[in-house]
Amino acid sequence: MKSIIKVFIILFICISNIYANDFRDIVEISLKKDEQKKILVKYGKIEKLFKFSWTLYKNGGLVVFRSYDKIVAQNVLYLRHSNRSFRLELKSRGADFYNVPYMLVKFKEFKFETNEAVFELFLSDKQEQISLKYLKNG
């Protein structure tokens, strides 16, 4: 009986590690108010620019502006709620309908002493089609 439990535990750990590592790249970025982060997204011969910044932190909500592929959007992210992040699909769905590469931008913390918002960027790209170039600010 003990050997069956040991085998089950080993299998569970192996399977959970396979599914837990869905992200190919994880980067942490700190931004001050109105400081813009630019990331060049490349796949095939296509290059697109992803830009985001934050403009207001009030009552635990961080107002984030973003633009990608001529689409401009605004999100309000909270540390203590389920809406801590937004998902950005990097390619059109097309033939890869179920495996679209995407970036997850997560609001990790707010540093009051430096007035900076800290984000984690996660890249999900199972077919390794996307390359990201983090451009310097300014």
Image (cartoon, rainbow, N blue to C red):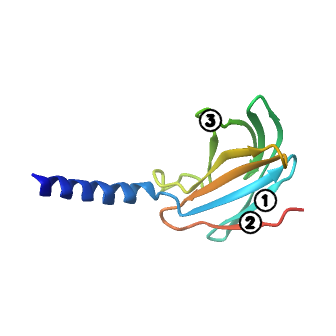
User: As shown in the figure, which amino acid type bears the numbered disc 2?
Assistant: Tyr
User: As shown in the figure, which amino acid type bears the numbered disc 1?
Assistant: Lys
> Which residue has dot 1 on it?
38
Q: Earlier in the sequence, mark 1 or mark 3?
A: 1
Q: CA distance from mark 2 to mark 1?
A: 6 Å
Q: Which residue is nearer to you in this view: 32 or 133?
A: 32
Q: Which-is-in-front pick, marks 1 and 3?
A: 3
Left/right of residue 61 with respect to residue 95 in the rendered view: right
Q: CA distance from mark 3 to mark 2?
A: 25 Å
- At horizontal 68% and vertical 45% (from top left) the residue drawn is 107
Provide the secondary structure element on which disc 3 rests. Answer: loop
Left/right of residue 28 with respect to residue 70 in the rendered view: left
Percent position of residue 109, x then y = 70, 45
> Which residue has dot 3 on it?
83
CB atoms at circles 2 and 1 under 8 Å apart? yes
| Crowd tier of the residue under label 3, counting other residues whose Cα lies within 10 Å: few below 14, some 14–19, many 20 or above | some
Is 107 above or below relative to 132? above
Provide the secondary structure element on which disc 2 rests. Answer: strand
Percent position of residue 42, x then y = 66, 67
| Crowd tier of the residue under label 2, counting other residues whose Cα lies within 10 Å: few below 14, some 14–19, many 20 or above | few
Residue 90 seen from this side: no
Task: Please state, as top left, top right, bottom left or bottom right, where the C terminus lies in the image.
Answer: bottom right
**Disc marking residue 134:** 2
- At horizontal 73% and vertical 50% (from top left) the residue drawn is 118
Q: CA distance from mark 1 to mark 3?
A: 23 Å
Query: Residue 73's image quarter?
Result: top right
Is 135 above or below relative to 9? below
